[in-house]
């Protein structure tokens, strides 16, 4: 009997291990985790809850930029409570997303107030841009999950991957992915993997862009990959000085963050993702639609004519937003 139990356990371990191999890019991207989030997810539309709903008269999106930890400089001064508070000159992401929404004929609300996340049913898309850490309370988590189960659309941009680390459902929402670390912000080539998607159509096969190039643990699985970064295209000569995010080493550090390590690191650092380093993908998740990109570190990436690659980046996220809200075909 003991031998039978041991064999069953060994078989279960082998199955779990084999499920974490065969990822694009080879062994460097294997064994980084592939979890069962207990929901229907992937690229098959069977995972979408195409339930009866009111016809769309006006596309409306909600932009959420709450930070409970490090705050990217492109978000600017933390916003006042409530919906659509006054913006400062340094609230670049929020201001430019208002412009993008106007150019595309969308209505948009924006907030950093968790209490405003209690009911999301009036929005065709919910967009998290560089949120951080525990950005939602329990009511907000429930509302987001119920929204997705009703066929909602979610867009994750940049440090949305540094958010809600310890909520497994949210990690699955991101495509079985989380921010692990990154090297220096630098220029590199974004390479289209799938040029037929609403987010990538019309974009050059390769375009130059400046970002932090997030390394991911877990590595995304069961998603449709849309774009990668060519790690061979960056070099030390591309690195330039960047404003430090609030909470970064040597930057102003919020009192609620744990102390930095008192000694130099003696543990490993991610080697990156080699020949397949994903930066954008899509999936169906728990009834809803998800477009996700790790890009979007720089303020100028959101500005009109802001920097090389800004127009391509904005086209990417606009197409992704349109696809999750149902204005364009999704994830195909």
Image (cartoon, helix red, strand yellow):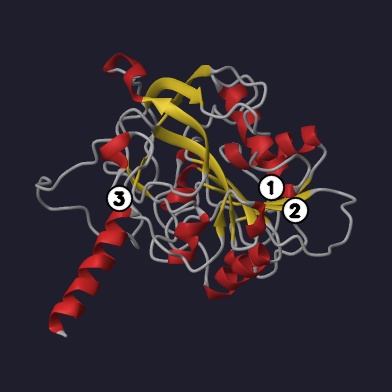
Quarter of the image containing the N terminus?
A: bottom left
Estimate the x, y position of residue 217 in percent, counting from the top left.
33, 49
Q: Which residue is mark 2?
A: 124
Query: Disc 3 vs disc 1: which is toward the camera?
Result: 3
Q: Is residue 113 left or right of residue 294?
A: right
Kindly identify the residue that appears in the image at 50 percent across and 46 percent down: 130
Kindly identify the residue that appears in the image at 25 percent across and 60 percent down: 14
Q: Disc 2 versus disc 3: distance between alpha carbons? A: 33 Å
Query: Disc 2 vs disc 3: which is toward the camera?
Result: 3
Disc nearer the start of the sequence (2/1):
2
Looking at the image, is 254 positioned above or below residue 231? below
How packed mark 1 is, by other alpha carbons closer than 10 Å (few <14, some 14-19, many 20 or more), is many
Estimate the x, y position of residue 262 in percent, counting from the top left.
12, 53
| Pick the front one: 10 or 35 | 10
Q: Is residue 260 left or right of residue 50?
A: left
Q: Disc 3 versus disc 1: distance between alpha carbons? A: 27 Å
């Amino acid at each position: 009997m003991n031998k039978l139990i041991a064999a069953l356990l060994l078989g279960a371990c082998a199955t779990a291990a084999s499920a974490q191999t065969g990822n694009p890019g080879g062994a460097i991207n294997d064994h980084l985790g592939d979890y069962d989030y207990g929901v229907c997810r992937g690229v098959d539309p069977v995972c979408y809850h195409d339930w009866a709903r009111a016809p769309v008269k006006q596309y409306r999106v909600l932009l959420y930029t709450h930070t409970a930890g490090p705050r990217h400089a492109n978000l600017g001064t933390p916003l006042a409570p409530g919906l659509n508070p006054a913006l400062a000159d340094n609230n670049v992401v929020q201001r430019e997303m208002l412009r993008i929404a106007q150019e595309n004929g969308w209505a948009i609300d924006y907030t950093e107030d968790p209490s405003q996340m209690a009911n999301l049913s009036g929005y065709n898309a919910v967009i998290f841009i560089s949120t951080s850490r525990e950005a939602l309370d329990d009511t907000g988590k429930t509302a987001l999950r119920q929204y997705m189960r009703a066929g909602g659309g979610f867009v994750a941009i940049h440090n949305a991957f540094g958010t809600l680390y310890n909520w497994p459902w949210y990690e699955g929402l991101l495509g079985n992915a989380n921010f692990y670390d990154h090297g220096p912000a630098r220029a590199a080539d974004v390479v289209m993997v799938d040029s037929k998607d609403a987010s990538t159509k019309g974009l050059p096969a390769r375009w130059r862009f400046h970002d932090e190039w997030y390394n991911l643990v877990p590595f995304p699985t069961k998603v449709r990959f849309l774009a990668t970064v060519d790690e061979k295209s960056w070099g030390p000569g591309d690195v330039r000085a960047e404003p430090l995010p609030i909470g970064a080493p040597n930057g102003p550090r919020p009192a609620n963050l744990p102390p930095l390590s008192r000694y130099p690191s003696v543990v490993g650092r991610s080697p990156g993702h080699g020949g397949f380093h994903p930066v954008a993908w899509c999936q169906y998740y728990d009834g809803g639609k998800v477009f996700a990109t790790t890009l979007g570190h720089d303020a100028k990436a959101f500005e009109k004519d802001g920097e090389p690659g800004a127009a391509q980046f904005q086209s990417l996220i606009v197409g992704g937003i349109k696809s999750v809200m149902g204005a364009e075909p999704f994830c195909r």
